[in-house]
Amino acid sequence: MTSGQQLRLYNSLGRRLEDFTPRGASAGTSEVGLYTCGPTVYSFQHLGNMRPYVFSDTLRRVLRWKGIGARQVVNITDVGHAVADSDTGEDKLEVAAARERRSVEEIAAFYTEDYFDRMAALNVRPADAYPRASEYVPQMVEFAARLSEKGYTYELPSGLYFDTSKSPGYGTLALLDLEGQREGARVEQVEGRRNKSDFALWRAEEPGSRRVMRWESPWGWGAPGWHLECSVMSMALLGEHFDIHTGGIDHRELHHVNEIAQSEAYLEDGQPWVRYWLHNEFILLDSEKIAKSAGHTLRLADLEEAGYHPLAYRLFLLGGHYRSQLDFTTAAMDAAQATLRRLVSRVAPLRPLPSVSTLEEARALVPAGDVPSREGGASREGTAAAEYISRLDAAACSDLATPTILATLQESLRDPAVPEAGLRVVVAAADALLGLRLGDLELREVEGRRSASDLAADEVERIERLVAERTQARKEKNWPRADEIRAELDALGVQLTDTPSGPLWELR
Ligand code: AMP
Ligand code: ZN
Protein backbone atom coordinates (compact mmCIF):
# COMPACT_ATOMS: atom_id res chain seq x y z
CA MET A 1 0.00 0.00 0.00
CA THR A 2 1.73 3.17 -1.15
CA SER A 3 -1.07 5.66 -1.58
CA GLY A 4 -0.81 6.83 2.06
CA GLN A 5 -3.30 9.26 3.53
CA GLN A 6 -6.24 10.80 1.71
CA LEU A 7 -5.33 14.33 0.53
CA ARG A 8 -7.58 16.86 2.19
CA LEU A 9 -7.80 20.51 1.16
CA TYR A 10 -9.68 23.45 2.62
CA ASN A 11 -12.24 24.55 0.08
CA SER A 12 -13.24 28.21 0.34
CA LEU A 13 -16.43 27.19 -1.44
CA GLY A 14 -18.27 25.87 1.61
CA ARG A 15 -15.41 26.81 3.95
CA ARG A 16 -14.49 23.29 4.96
CA LEU A 17 -11.82 20.64 4.67
CA GLU A 18 -12.69 18.20 1.92
CA ASP A 19 -11.21 15.06 0.46
CA PHE A 20 -9.61 15.97 -2.82
CA THR A 21 -10.94 13.92 -5.70
CA PRO A 22 -9.66 14.93 -9.13
CA ARG A 23 -12.30 15.34 -11.84
CA GLY A 24 -10.24 12.98 -13.96
CA ALA A 25 -10.96 10.21 -11.46
CA SER A 26 -14.34 9.92 -13.18
CA ALA A 27 -13.53 11.55 -16.53
CA GLY A 28 -10.63 9.22 -17.26
CA THR A 29 -7.94 11.90 -17.58
CA SER A 30 -4.94 11.82 -15.32
CA GLU A 31 -4.01 15.51 -15.04
CA VAL A 32 -5.49 17.96 -12.60
CA GLY A 33 -6.20 21.42 -13.99
CA LEU A 34 -4.92 24.20 -11.73
CA TYR A 35 -5.40 27.89 -12.35
CA THR A 36 -3.57 30.48 -10.26
CA CYS A 37 -4.41 34.17 -10.50
CA GLY A 38 -1.12 35.73 -11.48
CA PRO A 39 0.62 39.08 -11.23
CA THR A 40 -0.50 42.43 -12.55
CA VAL A 41 2.73 43.52 -14.18
CA TYR A 42 2.66 47.27 -13.65
CA SER A 43 5.26 47.39 -10.88
CA PHE A 44 7.53 45.13 -8.86
CA GLN A 45 5.82 42.37 -6.91
CA HIS A 46 6.13 42.98 -3.16
CA LEU A 47 6.87 40.40 -0.49
CA GLY A 48 3.17 39.66 0.06
CA ASN A 49 2.69 38.93 -3.64
CA MET A 50 5.20 36.09 -3.42
CA ARG A 51 2.97 34.04 -1.15
CA PRO A 52 0.28 32.94 -3.64
CA TYR A 53 2.94 31.44 -5.88
CA VAL A 54 4.96 29.67 -3.20
CA PHE A 55 1.62 28.36 -1.95
CA SER A 56 0.48 27.08 -5.36
CA ASP A 57 3.94 25.61 -5.94
CA THR A 58 3.56 23.73 -2.64
CA LEU A 59 0.16 22.51 -3.78
CA ARG A 60 1.69 21.17 -7.00
CA ARG A 61 4.47 19.49 -5.05
CA VAL A 62 1.92 17.79 -2.81
CA LEU A 63 -0.17 16.66 -5.79
CA ARG A 64 2.98 15.26 -7.39
CA TRP A 65 3.84 13.55 -4.08
CA LYS A 66 0.46 11.81 -4.25
CA GLY A 67 1.15 10.72 -7.83
CA ILE A 68 -1.26 13.29 -9.28
CA GLY A 69 0.01 15.20 -12.31
CA ALA A 70 -1.11 18.82 -12.61
CA ARG A 71 -1.27 21.29 -15.44
CA GLN A 72 -0.90 24.79 -14.03
CA VAL A 73 -1.81 28.03 -15.73
CA VAL A 74 -0.77 31.39 -14.26
CA ASN A 75 -2.07 34.46 -16.04
CA ILE A 76 -0.09 37.62 -16.60
CA THR A 77 -2.38 40.63 -16.29
CA ASP A 78 -1.04 43.16 -18.74
CA VAL A 79 -4.33 44.86 -19.49
CA GLY A 80 -7.72 45.28 -17.89
CA HIS A 81 -6.82 45.75 -14.22
CA ALA A 82 -8.01 49.25 -13.34
CA VAL A 83 -6.63 51.18 -10.39
CA ALA A 84 -8.38 50.30 -7.10
CA ASP A 85 -9.84 47.20 -8.79
CA SER A 86 -12.63 49.42 -10.08
CA ASP A 87 -14.62 49.28 -13.32
CA THR A 88 -14.18 52.78 -14.61
CA GLY A 89 -10.72 53.89 -13.49
CA GLU A 90 -7.56 54.05 -15.51
CA ASP A 91 -5.69 50.89 -16.40
CA LYS A 92 -2.82 50.17 -14.01
CA LEU A 93 -0.47 49.48 -16.89
CA GLU A 94 -1.26 52.76 -18.61
CA VAL A 95 -0.72 54.72 -15.40
CA ALA A 96 2.65 53.02 -14.92
CA ALA A 97 3.68 53.69 -18.52
CA ALA A 98 2.92 57.39 -18.12
CA ARG A 99 4.76 57.51 -14.78
CA GLU A 100 7.86 55.78 -16.10
CA ARG A 101 7.72 57.32 -19.58
CA ARG A 102 7.86 53.93 -21.21
CA SER A 103 5.44 52.07 -23.46
CA VAL A 104 2.90 49.71 -21.87
CA GLU A 105 4.66 46.84 -23.68
CA GLU A 106 7.98 47.80 -22.11
CA ILE A 107 6.38 48.08 -18.70
CA ALA A 108 4.72 44.68 -19.02
CA ALA A 109 7.85 42.99 -20.38
CA PHE A 110 10.09 44.47 -17.69
CA TYR A 111 7.93 43.55 -14.70
CA THR A 112 7.03 40.14 -16.11
CA GLU A 113 10.72 39.35 -16.44
CA ASP A 114 11.33 40.48 -12.87
CA TYR A 115 8.46 38.27 -11.69
CA PHE A 116 10.00 35.23 -13.44
CA ASP A 117 13.41 36.00 -11.88
CA ARG A 118 11.90 36.12 -8.39
CA MET A 119 10.00 32.90 -8.95
CA ALA A 120 13.22 31.17 -9.98
CA ALA A 121 15.02 32.54 -6.91
CA LEU A 122 12.22 31.16 -4.72
CA ASN A 123 12.51 27.79 -6.46
CA VAL A 124 8.91 28.02 -7.67
CA ARG A 125 8.62 25.63 -10.59
CA PRO A 126 7.48 27.24 -13.82
CA ALA A 127 3.80 26.86 -14.67
CA ASP A 128 2.83 25.07 -17.86
CA ALA A 129 1.46 28.25 -19.40
CA TYR A 130 1.60 31.99 -18.69
CA PRO A 131 -1.09 33.48 -20.92
CA ARG A 132 -1.06 37.28 -21.34
CA ALA A 133 -4.44 38.96 -21.06
CA SER A 134 -3.59 41.23 -24.01
CA GLU A 135 -3.32 38.17 -26.25
CA TYR A 136 -6.82 36.93 -25.48
CA VAL A 137 -8.93 40.03 -26.07
CA PRO A 138 -10.80 38.65 -29.14
CA GLN A 139 -11.80 35.56 -27.08
CA MET A 140 -12.92 37.85 -24.23
CA VAL A 141 -15.10 39.79 -26.65
CA GLU A 142 -16.65 36.53 -27.87
CA PHE A 143 -17.25 35.40 -24.28
CA ALA A 144 -18.96 38.68 -23.38
CA ALA A 145 -21.01 38.54 -26.59
CA ARG A 146 -22.32 35.10 -25.63
CA LEU A 147 -23.29 36.38 -22.18
CA SER A 148 -25.11 39.20 -23.94
CA GLU A 149 -27.00 36.80 -26.19
CA LYS A 150 -28.08 34.83 -23.15
CA GLY A 151 -29.44 37.98 -21.53
CA TYR A 152 -27.00 38.35 -18.67
CA THR A 153 -25.77 41.82 -19.59
CA TYR A 154 -26.82 45.40 -20.19
CA GLU A 155 -25.04 48.28 -21.83
CA LEU A 156 -24.23 51.69 -20.36
CA PRO A 157 -22.19 54.52 -21.86
CA SER A 158 -19.30 53.31 -19.67
CA GLY A 159 -19.41 49.78 -21.05
CA LEU A 160 -21.05 46.37 -20.93
CA TYR A 161 -22.11 45.17 -17.49
CA PHE A 162 -22.89 41.77 -16.05
CA ASP A 163 -26.25 41.79 -14.27
CA THR A 164 -25.57 39.91 -11.04
CA SER A 165 -29.28 39.64 -10.23
CA LYS A 166 -29.49 37.12 -13.10
CA SER A 167 -26.92 34.88 -11.41
CA PRO A 168 -28.82 32.70 -8.91
CA GLY A 169 -25.92 31.76 -6.66
CA TYR A 170 -24.11 35.09 -6.87
CA GLY A 171 -21.66 35.60 -4.03
CA THR A 172 -21.77 32.09 -2.54
CA LEU A 173 -17.97 31.99 -2.45
CA ALA A 174 -17.80 35.22 -0.48
CA LEU A 175 -20.72 34.13 1.76
CA LEU A 176 -22.61 37.24 0.69
CA ASP A 177 -26.05 36.90 2.23
CA LEU A 178 -29.18 37.41 0.19
CA GLU A 179 -29.61 41.02 1.27
CA GLY A 180 -25.97 41.84 0.89
CA GLN A 181 -25.73 39.78 -2.26
CA ARG A 182 -26.15 42.55 -4.71
CA GLU A 183 -24.30 45.09 -2.59
CA GLY A 184 -20.91 43.57 -3.37
CA ALA A 185 -17.64 44.72 -1.90
CA ARG A 186 -15.59 47.88 -2.46
CA VAL A 187 -17.10 48.92 -5.74
CA GLU A 188 -17.42 52.47 -6.94
CA GLN A 189 -20.57 54.31 -8.02
CA VAL A 190 -21.36 53.83 -11.67
CA GLU A 191 -24.09 55.86 -13.29
CA GLY A 192 -26.96 53.61 -14.35
CA ARG A 193 -25.69 50.39 -12.82
CA ARG A 194 -28.62 48.19 -11.79
CA ASN A 195 -27.04 46.44 -8.79
CA LYS A 196 -24.04 47.58 -6.82
CA SER A 197 -22.32 44.26 -7.42
CA ASP A 198 -22.71 44.39 -11.23
CA PHE A 199 -19.33 44.54 -12.90
CA ALA A 200 -17.89 45.57 -16.24
CA LEU A 201 -17.23 42.96 -18.88
CA TRP A 202 -16.18 45.68 -21.29
CA ARG A 203 -14.90 49.12 -20.35
CA ALA A 204 -15.81 51.52 -23.10
CA GLU A 205 -13.72 54.57 -23.89
CA GLU A 206 -15.20 57.76 -22.57
CA PRO A 207 -16.20 60.17 -25.32
CA GLY A 208 -13.22 62.37 -26.18
CA SER A 209 -10.68 60.15 -24.46
CA ARG A 210 -8.60 57.45 -26.04
CA ARG A 211 -7.05 54.53 -24.21
CA VAL A 212 -3.53 53.45 -25.08
CA MET A 213 -4.56 49.79 -25.13
CA ARG A 214 -7.79 49.66 -27.11
CA TRP A 215 -9.74 47.12 -29.09
CA GLU A 216 -12.88 47.28 -31.15
CA SER A 217 -15.95 45.48 -29.85
CA PRO A 218 -19.72 45.42 -30.37
CA TRP A 219 -19.82 47.89 -27.44
CA GLY A 220 -17.40 50.35 -28.99
CA TRP A 221 -13.67 50.83 -28.63
CA GLY A 222 -12.32 50.00 -25.23
CA ALA A 223 -10.72 47.32 -23.08
CA PRO A 224 -11.93 44.20 -21.25
CA GLY A 225 -12.97 44.20 -17.61
CA TRP A 226 -10.49 42.69 -15.18
CA HIS A 227 -12.44 39.55 -14.21
CA LEU A 228 -13.03 38.39 -17.77
CA GLU A 229 -9.47 37.33 -18.55
CA CYS A 230 -9.29 34.60 -15.90
CA SER A 231 -12.52 32.91 -17.02
CA VAL A 232 -11.54 33.06 -20.67
CA MET A 233 -7.90 32.02 -20.38
CA SER A 234 -8.51 29.24 -17.87
CA MET A 235 -11.22 27.68 -20.06
CA ALA A 236 -9.06 28.09 -23.18
CA LEU A 237 -6.10 26.31 -21.60
CA LEU A 238 -7.64 23.92 -19.08
CA GLY A 239 -11.05 23.13 -20.54
CA GLU A 240 -14.47 24.43 -19.54
CA HIS A 241 -14.32 22.81 -16.12
CA PHE A 242 -11.17 22.18 -14.15
CA ASP A 243 -10.22 21.12 -10.64
CA ILE A 244 -8.57 23.85 -8.61
CA HIS A 245 -8.45 27.63 -8.67
CA THR A 246 -6.12 29.51 -6.33
CA GLY A 247 -5.30 33.09 -5.40
CA GLY A 248 -4.89 35.51 -2.52
CA ILE A 249 -7.69 35.78 0.03
CA ASP A 250 -8.80 39.19 -1.27
CA HIS A 251 -9.88 37.47 -4.50
CA ARG A 252 -12.36 35.34 -2.55
CA GLU A 253 -14.46 38.44 -1.94
CA LEU A 254 -14.72 40.01 -5.39
CA HIS A 255 -12.61 38.80 -8.30
CA HIS A 256 -13.38 35.10 -7.88
CA VAL A 257 -17.03 35.78 -7.07
CA ASN A 258 -17.31 37.52 -10.42
CA GLU A 259 -15.28 34.91 -12.28
CA ILE A 260 -17.72 32.25 -11.04
CA ALA A 261 -20.82 34.30 -11.90
CA GLN A 262 -19.79 34.97 -15.50
CA SER A 263 -18.37 31.48 -16.10
CA GLU A 264 -21.43 29.64 -14.80
CA ALA A 265 -23.66 31.98 -16.80
CA TYR A 266 -21.55 31.25 -19.88
CA LEU A 267 -21.65 27.48 -19.39
CA GLU A 268 -25.21 27.20 -18.06
CA ASP A 269 -24.77 23.49 -17.49
CA GLY A 270 -25.84 23.39 -13.86
CA GLN A 271 -22.39 22.23 -12.76
CA PRO A 272 -20.10 24.16 -10.48
CA TRP A 273 -17.51 25.70 -12.81
CA VAL A 274 -14.54 24.80 -10.58
CA ARG A 275 -14.82 22.44 -7.61
CA TYR A 276 -12.01 23.54 -5.31
CA TRP A 277 -11.18 27.15 -4.46
CA LEU A 278 -8.05 27.64 -2.36
CA HIS A 279 -6.90 30.97 -0.97
CA ASN A 280 -3.79 32.07 0.85
CA GLU A 281 -3.95 34.57 3.70
CA PHE A 282 -2.01 37.81 3.76
CA ILE A 283 1.52 38.64 4.77
CA LEU A 284 1.38 41.53 7.21
CA LEU A 285 3.82 44.31 7.91
CA ASP A 286 3.24 46.18 11.18
CA SER A 287 -0.13 44.40 11.48
CA GLU A 288 -1.29 45.64 8.07
CA LYS A 289 -1.63 43.78 4.80
CA ILE A 290 1.37 44.45 2.59
CA ALA A 291 -0.20 46.29 -0.32
CA LYS A 292 1.08 48.30 -3.22
CA SER A 293 -1.83 50.68 -2.80
CA ALA A 294 -0.66 51.40 0.78
CA GLY A 295 2.72 52.39 -0.63
CA HIS A 296 4.44 49.18 0.47
CA THR A 297 7.25 48.30 -1.83
CA LEU A 298 9.30 45.88 0.24
CA ARG A 299 10.38 43.18 -2.14
CA LEU A 300 12.52 40.10 -2.40
CA ALA A 301 15.40 42.05 -3.97
CA ASP A 302 15.55 44.21 -0.82
CA LEU A 303 15.94 41.12 1.32
CA GLU A 304 18.71 39.82 -0.93
CA GLU A 305 20.47 43.15 -0.70
CA ALA A 306 20.27 42.94 3.09
CA GLY A 307 22.08 39.59 2.88
CA TYR A 308 19.18 37.15 3.14
CA HIS A 309 18.90 34.24 0.79
CA PRO A 310 15.61 34.19 -1.17
CA LEU A 311 15.05 30.64 0.02
CA ALA A 312 15.15 31.93 3.58
CA TYR A 313 12.05 33.90 2.60
CA ARG A 314 10.53 30.73 1.16
CA LEU A 315 11.30 29.01 4.45
CA PHE A 316 9.74 31.92 6.36
CA LEU A 317 6.56 31.49 4.27
CA LEU A 318 6.47 27.72 4.76
CA GLY A 319 6.96 28.19 8.49
CA GLY A 320 3.34 29.42 8.59
CA HIS A 321 0.31 27.61 7.25
CA TYR A 322 -0.89 29.21 4.01
CA ARG A 323 -4.29 29.96 5.58
CA SER A 324 -2.78 31.89 8.50
CA GLN A 325 -1.78 35.48 8.40
CA LEU A 326 1.94 35.85 8.82
CA ASP A 327 3.79 38.85 10.24
CA PHE A 328 6.87 39.82 8.34
CA THR A 329 9.60 40.99 10.73
CA THR A 330 13.37 41.19 10.60
CA ALA A 331 13.57 38.86 13.59
CA ALA A 332 11.48 36.26 11.73
CA MET A 333 13.73 36.60 8.67
CA ASP A 334 16.85 36.24 10.83
CA ALA A 335 15.38 33.10 12.34
CA ALA A 336 14.47 31.72 8.90
CA GLN A 337 17.96 32.38 7.56
CA ALA A 338 19.51 30.71 10.62
CA THR A 339 17.22 27.68 10.24
CA LEU A 340 18.08 27.36 6.56
CA ARG A 341 21.78 27.60 7.37
CA ARG A 342 21.47 24.91 10.04
CA LEU A 343 19.50 22.65 7.73
CA VAL A 344 22.05 23.00 4.95
CA SER A 345 25.03 22.39 7.22
CA ARG A 346 23.33 19.33 8.72
CA VAL A 347 22.24 17.91 5.36
CA ALA A 348 25.42 18.65 3.36
CA PRO A 349 27.29 15.56 4.66
CA LEU A 350 24.35 13.36 3.58
CA ARG A 351 24.63 14.39 -0.07
CA PRO A 352 24.04 13.26 -2.73
CA LEU A 353 20.38 12.90 -1.87
CA PRO A 354 18.35 10.36 -3.82
CA SER A 355 15.87 11.64 -6.36
CA VAL A 356 12.43 11.55 -4.75
CA SER A 357 9.29 13.38 -5.76
CA THR A 358 6.51 10.99 -4.83
CA LEU A 359 5.47 9.05 -1.76
CA GLU A 360 5.72 5.90 -3.80
CA GLU A 361 9.35 6.60 -4.69
CA ALA A 362 10.18 7.37 -1.07
CA ARG A 363 8.53 4.16 0.12
CA ALA A 364 10.35 2.12 -2.50
CA LEU A 365 13.66 3.44 -1.19
CA VAL A 366 12.73 2.88 2.45
CA PRO A 367 10.73 -0.30 2.75
CA ALA A 368 8.08 -0.05 5.44
CA GLY A 369 7.98 -2.75 8.07
CA ASP A 370 10.71 -4.24 10.14
CA VAL A 371 13.98 -5.00 8.48
CA PRO A 372 15.73 -8.11 9.78
CA SER A 373 18.96 -7.17 11.53
CA ARG A 374 22.18 -9.13 11.12
CA GLU A 375 21.90 -10.48 14.62
CA GLY A 376 18.44 -11.79 13.85
CA GLY A 377 15.19 -10.25 15.05
CA ALA A 378 13.91 -6.92 13.78
CA SER A 379 15.65 -3.60 13.95
CA ARG A 380 13.91 -0.30 14.62
CA GLU A 381 16.23 1.22 12.04
CA GLY A 382 14.23 -0.19 9.18
CA THR A 383 11.01 1.36 10.43
CA ALA A 384 12.27 4.71 11.73
CA ALA A 385 12.73 6.29 8.28
CA ALA A 386 9.47 4.77 7.02
CA GLU A 387 7.68 6.28 9.99
CA TYR A 388 9.02 9.72 9.16
CA ILE A 389 7.92 9.31 5.54
CA SER A 390 4.41 8.46 6.75
CA ARG A 391 4.41 11.51 8.99
CA LEU A 392 5.48 13.73 6.09
CA ASP A 393 2.66 12.25 4.07
CA ALA A 394 0.13 12.86 6.82
CA ALA A 395 1.22 16.50 7.15
CA ALA A 396 1.16 17.10 3.39
CA CYS A 397 -2.31 15.55 3.13
CA SER A 398 -3.60 17.64 5.99
CA ASP A 399 -4.23 20.74 3.84
CA LEU A 400 -0.52 21.24 3.09
CA ALA A 401 0.70 21.57 6.69
CA THR A 402 4.15 22.91 5.82
CA PRO A 403 5.06 23.89 9.42
CA THR A 404 4.57 20.23 10.40
CA ILE A 405 6.61 19.02 7.42
CA LEU A 406 9.43 21.33 8.48
CA ALA A 407 9.24 20.22 12.12
CA THR A 408 9.20 16.55 11.10
CA LEU A 409 12.27 17.03 8.93
CA GLN A 410 14.10 18.74 11.81
CA GLU A 411 13.12 16.00 14.22
CA SER A 412 14.37 13.28 11.88
CA LEU A 413 17.72 15.01 11.57
CA ARG A 414 18.13 14.85 15.35
CA ASP A 415 16.89 11.28 15.73
CA PRO A 416 19.71 8.77 16.29
CA ALA A 417 17.37 5.88 15.42
CA VAL A 418 17.33 6.85 11.72
CA PRO A 419 20.27 5.33 9.85
CA GLU A 420 22.02 7.54 7.32
CA ALA A 421 20.65 5.76 4.24
CA GLY A 422 17.09 6.14 5.52
CA LEU A 423 17.70 9.72 6.58
CA ARG A 424 18.79 10.63 3.06
CA VAL A 425 15.41 9.48 1.79
CA VAL A 426 13.53 11.35 4.52
CA VAL A 427 15.39 14.58 3.69
CA ALA A 428 14.84 14.14 -0.06
CA ALA A 429 11.14 13.43 0.57
CA ALA A 430 10.72 16.48 2.81
CA ASP A 431 12.44 18.65 0.26
CA ALA A 432 10.28 17.33 -2.55
CA LEU A 433 7.45 18.96 -0.58
CA LEU A 434 9.26 22.05 0.70
CA GLY A 435 11.44 22.96 -2.27
CA LEU A 436 14.31 24.42 -0.24
CA ARG A 437 16.99 22.95 -2.52
CA LEU A 438 18.45 20.93 0.34
CA GLY A 439 20.13 18.68 -2.21
CA ASP A 440 22.38 21.33 -3.69
CA LEU A 441 22.24 24.63 -1.83
CA GLU A 442 25.78 25.56 -0.80
CA LEU A 443 26.47 26.55 2.76
CA ARG A 444 28.33 29.65 1.62
CA GLU A 445 25.16 30.82 -0.15
CA VAL A 446 23.31 30.96 3.15
CA GLU A 447 26.15 32.08 5.34
CA GLY A 448 25.28 34.59 8.01
CA ARG A 449 24.82 38.13 6.96
CA ARG A 450 26.21 39.20 10.33
CA SER A 451 29.70 38.85 11.67
CA ALA A 452 30.61 38.80 15.35
CA SER A 453 31.55 42.47 15.15
CA ASP A 454 27.91 43.30 14.30
CA LEU A 455 26.64 41.77 17.51
CA ALA A 456 25.46 43.91 20.41
CA ALA A 457 27.55 43.68 23.58
CA ASP A 458 24.88 41.72 25.45
CA GLU A 459 24.61 39.18 22.62
CA VAL A 460 28.38 38.61 22.77
CA GLU A 461 28.18 38.29 26.55
CA ARG A 462 25.43 35.67 26.25
CA ILE A 463 27.42 33.61 23.75
CA GLU A 464 30.60 33.81 25.84
CA ARG A 465 28.67 32.71 28.91
CA LEU A 466 27.19 29.71 27.08
CA VAL A 467 30.61 28.72 25.70
CA ALA A 468 32.10 28.88 29.21
CA GLU A 469 29.21 26.88 30.65
CA ARG A 470 29.71 24.21 27.99
CA THR A 471 33.44 24.00 28.76
CA GLN A 472 32.57 23.51 32.42
CA ALA A 473 29.95 20.84 31.59
CA ARG A 474 32.50 18.96 29.50
CA LYS A 475 35.02 19.09 32.34
CA GLU A 476 32.38 17.54 34.58
CA LYS A 477 31.66 14.97 31.84
CA ASN A 478 28.06 16.21 31.80
CA TRP A 479 27.68 15.40 28.09
CA PRO A 480 23.91 15.87 27.83
CA ARG A 481 24.24 19.42 29.21
CA ALA A 482 27.19 20.15 26.91
CA ASP A 483 25.17 18.97 23.91
CA GLU A 484 22.19 21.03 24.99
CA ILE A 485 24.30 24.17 25.12
CA ARG A 486 25.82 23.39 21.77
CA ALA A 487 22.32 23.13 20.30
CA GLU A 488 21.40 26.46 21.88
CA LEU A 489 24.50 28.08 20.39
CA ASP A 490 23.67 26.49 17.08
CA ALA A 491 20.26 28.08 17.20
CA LEU A 492 21.95 31.45 17.65
CA GLY A 493 23.96 30.81 14.49
CA VAL A 494 27.16 30.24 16.45
CA GLN A 495 29.69 27.76 15.11
CA LEU A 496 31.96 26.18 17.72
CA THR A 497 35.33 24.63 17.03
CA ASP A 498 37.17 22.85 19.84
CA THR A 499 40.92 23.51 19.61
CA PRO A 500 43.73 22.36 21.93
CA SER A 501 43.72 25.82 23.44
CA GLY A 502 39.98 25.78 24.09
CA PRO A 503 36.79 26.39 22.08
CA LEU A 504 36.64 29.05 19.37
CA TRP A 505 33.38 30.48 18.17
CA GLU A 506 32.25 32.41 15.16
CA LEU A 507 28.97 33.27 13.50
CA ARG A 508 27.98 31.11 10.61
P1 AMP B 1 -1.58 41.58 -7.94
O1 AMP B 1 -0.26 41.53 -8.71
O2 AMP B 1 -1.77 42.87 -7.21
O3 AMP B 1 -2.75 41.25 -8.84
O4 AMP B 1 -1.51 40.47 -6.80
C1 AMP B 1 -0.99 39.20 -7.01
C2 AMP B 1 -1.42 38.23 -5.94
O5 AMP B 1 -0.87 38.60 -4.66
C3 AMP B 1 -2.92 38.12 -5.70
O6 AMP B 1 -3.25 36.73 -5.61
C4 AMP B 1 -3.15 38.81 -4.37
O7 AMP B 1 -4.26 38.28 -3.69
C5 AMP B 1 -1.86 38.47 -3.64
N1 AMP B 1 -1.51 39.38 -2.53
C6 AMP B 1 -1.49 40.73 -2.56
N2 AMP B 1 -1.07 41.24 -1.37
C7 AMP B 1 -0.77 40.18 -0.58
C8 AMP B 1 -0.27 40.02 0.77
N3 AMP B 1 0.04 41.08 1.53
N4 AMP B 1 -0.09 38.78 1.26
C9 AMP B 1 -0.38 37.70 0.49
N5 AMP B 1 -0.87 37.76 -0.77
C10 AMP B 1 -1.06 38.98 -1.31
ZN1 ZN C 1 -7.90 35.94 -11.69
Image (cartoon, grey):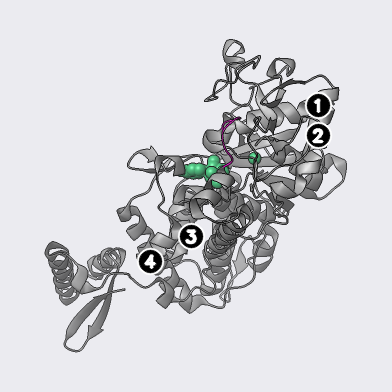
Residue farthest bottom in this picture: 500
| Above or below: residue 399 compared with residue 207 | below
State how far apart marks 2 and 1 are (Cα): 6 Å
Question: What residue range appears in magenta?
Answer: 86-91
Which residue is tagged 3? Answer: 409
Q: Quick check: marks 2 and 1 in contact, CB under 8 Å?
A: yes
Under tag 4, what secondary structure?
Answer: helix
Type of amino acid under label 3: Leu
N-terminal of the two: label 4 or label 3? 4
Q: What residue is pinned by disc 2?
A: 143
Q: With 24 as the anchor, is 467 left or right in this view?
A: left
Residue 119: percent from the left, percent from the top? 56, 60
Marks 4/1: CA–CA distance = 49 Å
The correct choice, above or below, for 261 with respect to 337 in the image is above
Mark carried by residue 147: 1
Mark nearer the viewer, 2 or 3? 2
Q: Which amino acid does label 1 sit on?
A: Leu
Quadrant containing the C terminus is: bottom left
